[in-house]
Image (tube, rainbow, N blue to C red):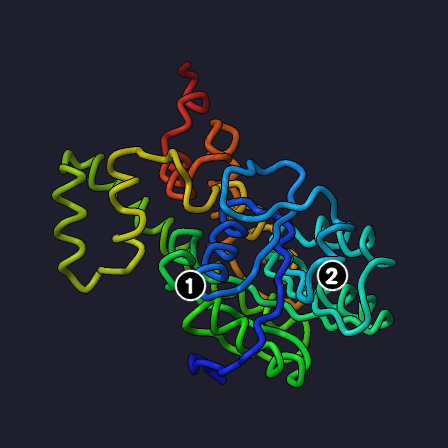
Amino acid sequence: MEHNDAHLNQHLPKVGVVGVGLLGKAIAERLVDQGYSVAGYDPVACHATELQFCDSLTELIQKVEIVLLCLPDSGIAAEVIEDGYGLFLDHQVVIDTTTGSPEEMIAMGHKLARRNVSYLEANVAGSSQQMLEGEATLFVGGDARFVELNGSLFDAISTQWFHLGSLGAGSRFKLVHNMVLGLNRLVLAEGLEFARSLGMDGVKTLEILKRTPAYSNVMNSKGDRMVCRDFENPQARLSQHLKDVCLMIDQAQASGGNIPLTMLHQQLLERAEELGFGACDNSAIIEGLKPDLSKNGLS
C-alpha cells in the first residue's frame, strides 16, 4: 500500500536521532523543517549542525518520544538497543532506518516488545541529498497499528512511503531495491568504460545516452561523477553498498535465489575498495572495472 497523504497531528512528538552521519543528518534536517523538535546523538559524527546534541544515549532516550536509528548496519543498531534496553520508556517508539539483516531487525523488534516499546523499520531508498530534497522513499515494516500511529512522522520524512508488511519485510524489499539500483550504476559504469575504450568522449557519450531508450535516472545522479572521476563529497559511500551486496548474497543463499550479476558486482566493489575507493561515492564502482594489469605481468 502506498502512502503520501499528509496526516494532521496537533502534537508533534520530540524525536531523537541516533547516528548523525550523511543520512541521519538529512533526516533530522527534514524533520526540523517540518516543525519537529529533534535531538541528536553520535559519538563520532561532527556536531557542526543546528541540531541539539545529547552527550549520551541515556540523555537522548530520556528526552524524546521517538528514537530514530540511522546506523551503518544492524549489528551496530543491535548494540544500541542493548545499551539502551533498560532505559527505554513504556510506549516509547523506536524507528530503525538502518539497512541490515531482516532477521536481526525481527529480533530487535521482539526484544523491545518485551519492554512495551514499539519497533518499526523504515528503510530509506535514496541518497542523503535525495532525502534533503524530499525525493527519498521509505520501505516500512512492522505492526500495522504502530505504522498508522506514526504515519505523520513518515510523511514528514518522505513524500512517499510503503508499508510492506511485518518486521523484516521493509529490510528485504530494501535489498531488492538496492540490488536493482546498484546494478544500474554498474551497467552505466561499464558502458562508459566501453565507450572510452573505443575512443569516444565520455561527456558526449553520456549526453547521447540520456536521450535514448538506454536512459535511466542513474545517468543524472552518477553519470557526471563517473565521467569526471569526481568521487569526493559522497552521496552514499561505495563501502556501504558493498555491505548491502553482502547482505543480498546472504539472503539469496538462504532463500535459494539465483543472483549471478550481484555475485560479480561484489567482486568489482571489493576491487574498487582495495584500490582505495571505499569511502568515496558509490559512483567509484567505475574504478573497479579498470583492467588489472598485475594479471598481465605488468606493474
Q: Is residue 216 left or right of residue 8?
A: left
- Does residue 159 appear in this view? yes
Mark 1–mark 2 distance (CA, rounded to whole Å) = 24 Å
- The amino acid type of the residue labelled 1 equals Ala
Pick the front one: 162 or 119: 119
Residue under circle 1? 136
Which quadrant of the view contains residue 247? bottom right
Residue at (53%, 64%) from the top-left corner? 36
Residue at (44%, 80%) from the top-left corner? 6
Number of the label disc, if any, that sits on residue 104: 2
Residue 61 picture location, percent across and down: 74, 57
Number of other residues with Cα within 10 Å of mark 1, as a class: few under 14, some 14 to 19, many 20 or more: some
- The amino acid type of the residue labelled 2 equals Glu
Residue at (77%, 64%) from the top-left corner? 108
Q: Which quadrant is the C terminus positioned in?
A: top left
Pick the front one: 132 or 255: 132
Q: Which one is in front in this view, the residue at disc 1 or the one at disc 2? A: 1
